[in-house]
Image (spheres, rainbow, N blue to C red):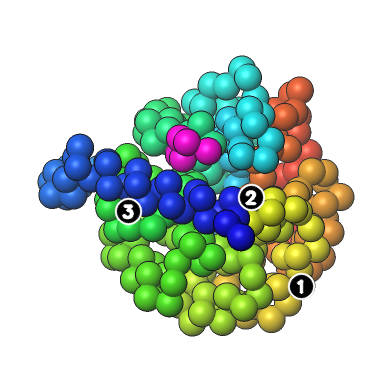
Amino acid sequence: MTTILDTIVEKKREEIAARRSECPASELEARLVDAPPARGFVDAIRATADVALIAEIKKASPSAGVIREDFDAVQLARTYHQAGATCLSCLTDELFFQGRLEYLSAIREQVDCPVLRKDFVLDQYQLLESRVAGADAVLLIAECLDERELPDLYRAATQMGLDVLLEIYEPSNLERALDLEPPLLGVNNRDLRTFDTDLGHTLRVGATVPGTTMLVAESGIATREDVEYLAGGGVAAILVGETLMRAGSVAEKTSELVGVPRR
């Protein structure tokens, strides 16, 4: 049976081909010399004694539809940063999440906070796009990448100066993820095939992650109690989008989720 993730990946490959025909990789490579220097996404998380908040700019999702009508990517980024977020995540997928790479570029120009390109990265062309747009880090999802693609893209990203948030959902992908010795390992509590969420998934999957790798919990985090629960399981950072985007006061909700000490 075709899953939501299968559909997204199929459409993403079509999108990459179209974008490459409009702007060849050679043109992006030429523009790399003018790209702003990457800021340390991993270093920012490592430097905080608290559970770091990676606050996400996310207008919509396939499961929820439009999440926030009064959407201003730069203003949201400013609010997150001022309220104590350690890093930012910007959705750039257009078809399923109503994101844009231009949102990331605008945030990079206006907000002094490391920013992750959140997308379904399947090709080195997207790494070039990310670096030129000003991303400091990219997301790589193991469930989207085979045994060759994952290490190839991981190494290409790091060689380009991009930090990587390496994400898994299935426990079966843990070993090949850890083989890369990533400083950050994200565990998605949301099954991208069904979009069902289980907050405890991070702790079960991450129980054997070595101390050299910082564990990031993604999805399903709604309250300070959730953050404290995850901190108790050794989580170093959380990635939160929908909870913040739905909040009546984004600043207040952001403040609620920061300042939880790591354990």
Q: Position of residue 122 (x, y in %)?
A: 39, 58
Disc number for residue 239 = 2
Residue 180 visible, this orientation = yes
Q: Nearer the viewer, residue 71 or 255?
A: 71
In terms of secondary structure, where does tag 1 sit? helix
Mark 2 or mark 3, whichever is nearer to me: 3
Q: Distance between the residues labelled 3 and 1?
A: 31 Å
Q: In which quarter of the image is the N terminus?
A: bottom right
**Which percent across, then down, holds residue 114?**
47, 45
- At label 2, the amino acid type is Leu
Read off the residue under disc 1: 204
Question: Up-down: is 148 above or below 118?
Answer: below
Give the residue at the far right of this rendering: 225
- Say which amino acid is labelled 1: Arg
| Alpha-carbon span between mark 2 and mark 3 | 21 Å
**Residue at position x 45%, y 66% in the image:** 145
The residue sitting at 37% across, 75% down in the picture is: 148
For the residues labelled 1 and 2, say whether their Cβ atoms are less than 8 Å apart. Answer: no
Q: What stretch is highlighted in magenta?
A: 92-96
Residue drawn where x is 75% and y is 49% of the image: 220
Q: Mark 3 points at which residue?
A: 127
Q: Is residue 94 magenta?
A: yes
Relative side of 90 to 33, left or right: right
Q: Label 3 neighbourhood size at 10 Å, few (<14), some (14-19), many (20+)?
A: many
Along the viewing direction, whichever of 102 and 163 lies nearer the viewer: 102
Look at label 3 and name its amino acid.
Leu
